[in-house]
Amino acid sequence: MELSEIETLLKEALNLDEVYVRGEGSHYNIIAVSDAFNEMSRVKRQQAVYAPLADKIADGTMHAVNIKTFSVADWARERQFNIPQ
């Protein structure tokens, strides 16, 4: 699965302000940015990002997924240390 496909899927499903996906093989790192995360616990944030990917995880296309979620304001501070490539 192409990284851009995952980014598009997540952006459309979650109405994200920004999303960055890096991966190798079936292992992926995702940074998702949205103010919708402000009202969510860490567990709910993870569940929100996993939900649109559930089919890909179930069929083995995606095996390991590391997710970091940020509000827009938090990401403005955090991006200094997590520069997406």
Image (tube, helix red, strand yellow):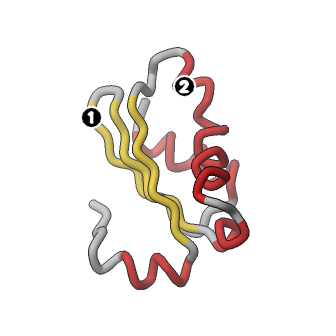
Of 58 and 43, nearer the camera is 43
Find the residue positioned furthest to the top. 59
Q: Earlier in the sequence, mark 2 or mark 1?
A: 1
The answer to which image quadrant residue 15 occupies is bottom right
Q: Position of residue 60 (x, y in %)?
A: 46, 17
Q: Position of residue 56 (x, y in %)?
A: 54, 25
Mark 1 Cα-neighbour bin, 10 Å: few <14, some 14–19, many ≥20: few
Quarter in which the N terminus is drawn: top left
The answer to which image quadrant residue 53 occupies is top right
Residue, disc 2: 56
User: In screen coordinates, is 33 left or right of 22?
Assistant: right
In this rendering, the answer to whether 19 lies above or below 74 is: above
Q: Are marks 2 and 1 in contact (CB under 8 Å)?
A: no
Residue, disc 1: 24
Q: Residue at x 69, y 48 (%)?
A: 13
Q: Residue at x 46, y 76 (%)?
A: 75
